[in-house]
Amino acid sequence: MLRNKPDEDDYWNNSKFKAFTFEDEDDEFSQLKESKRAVNSIFVADDDDDDEDDDDVEKVSWSGEPVGSISWSIKETASTHRTTGEGRDYGFPKIETTAQIPSLPKQGSSYSLSSLFKGRSKLGNFQVLSDSTNDPSLRSFAPELRKPKSEYKDYISDWSPEDTVRRMQKGKPYSLESFRSLKDKLLLLDEAVQIHDGNVITAVLIFLKKSLSKEILFRELVSRQIALQHFIHFLKEAGEQKLLLELLKTLGRTEDMALLQYSEHLNIKDEVQRKDFLKGCISLPFSVDDASHVQDHYTLLERQIIVEVNDKHLEKAGQTEIFKKYPRKASILNMPIITTLYYSCFYHYGESEGTYSSPANIKRTFKISDKQYLLAALGARAKLKAWKDVDTLFTTKNWLGYTKKKTPIGFHRVADILHKNNAPVQVLQEYVCLVDDTDLKLNLASKYKCHDVIIDTYKDMKDRHQLMVYRCKVDRSSPEERKIDDILSNTQIRWKN
């Protein structure tokens, strides 16, 4: 029931608990003691509520209505309907409750503020939520939601090998642990191979690797070449060199086993240790060609180490002109044979064949062809603008003592390499003249501005018209123009036109 204003003020002002205010001027210690006594008195009073009646304490709602009264129940029910029924519409179908659902008796609240903090009511512990759902009258409000029966098979692991492989291919959940016998595991592998899916085959092989001994696995893979190739590739990618070597040895593939061991040199950073490792690889059962390659690799690295130590010392001393003018940009260690030859032609050209750094010694030791040697030497000497050395590369003598220029790569390539290294026109035209094809010769001469080559070619062709046309292209009063005029005025030449 409602109280008038004076009674309500008297009720709140006559509380048996003293409120804590911030306006007290006691010291800090007194305030803490007062707060502790107030808190302790709350818990003592709450414990007394379990054994005694608290008729002297009346429970009221925020509106002032006594909790459990008729007027409070009516207002509480009305506010609940407004909040849940009118506030939001979830789209569920409305249910006629007047005829089907029995009315629930409204009871007054039996909970105090202290019982909420302690987690229990005056009547005992809170009712468990699952207990309240046992009421059949309430089950209609919570219909049971179940997954379609077709989805239950995703959680059943009793699949055949074919079904398991199909599920693996489609990315659905699967389990391989149910395949325990050797026969079932091999059937699973055969099904994986039949669908031609590398990912599925690899997944099954990983399962077999974990669940079978290596002897049994190797024995069964011998008759399954597709699975065997997948397994070898997987071991290479996974870096399981030891197991891969055992597999290759079981298969009798000694050459592949030797190549696999040889590839381990890539993981060795120290050059001396790598050289020693390569020396040990020479005795492995390689094929004839591979054995020659491994031997050359060891010999090359051995020489590179010697040359590197010597050149580093010369460069540091600063007494060699070539190293002072062209300092080294990188180490020669672990470089290919052609790069090593270029390096030797650049820094050690002209050395006697008895030294490890001599280009001639490298050419002979590693059986480098004339064409490869010429390209490396031409590029190195042209880079240094050593045109006499370039001329020597192509000059040969016959048995009568006559000299002749000859090249295995064609003089048009020689002219192109010289032009890229900024050779002067006098050097270029000497090699452009040696091009056999006339049209190619004229094109190169025009490209590199070798005027004398063009003029002499038209003279040899006895083409007066082309000479007159080209005369208009050269500079006035230039040596080229005067040369053309002299040729045109020569009466002894029989022109074609």
Image (cartoon, rainbow, N blue to C red):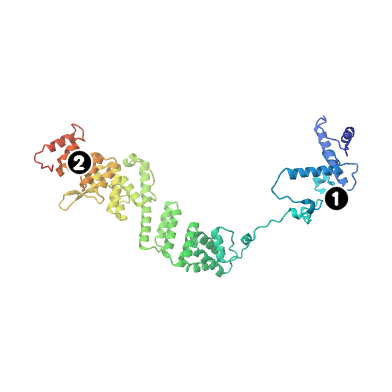
* Above or below, comparing residue 297 to residue 89 in the picture: below
**In the image, what residue type sits under mark 1?**
Leu
Q: Earlier in the sequence, mark 1 or mark 2?
A: 1
Name which quarter of the figure residue 473 lies in. Answer: top left
Q: Residue at x 35, y 56 (%)?
A: 296
Q: Residue at x 71, y 50 (%)?
A: 93
**Element on which disc 2 rests:** helix
Q: Which residue is mark 2?
A: 454
Q: Is residue 202 visible?
A: yes
**Element on which disc 1 rests:** loop
* Above or below, comparing residue 241 to residue 342 in the picture: below
Q: Give the number of the disc on residue 272.
A: none
Residue 117, how many percent across, how many down? Answer: 80, 45
**In the image, what residue type sits under mark 2?**
Ile
Q: Whole-Å distance between the Cαs marked 1 and 2? A: 121 Å
Q: Is residue 210 visible?
A: no
Q: Which residue is mark 1?
A: 123
Residue 205, how many percent across, how many down? Answer: 52, 63
Residue 285, how many percent across, how many down? Answer: 40, 64
Spot the residue most to the left.
492
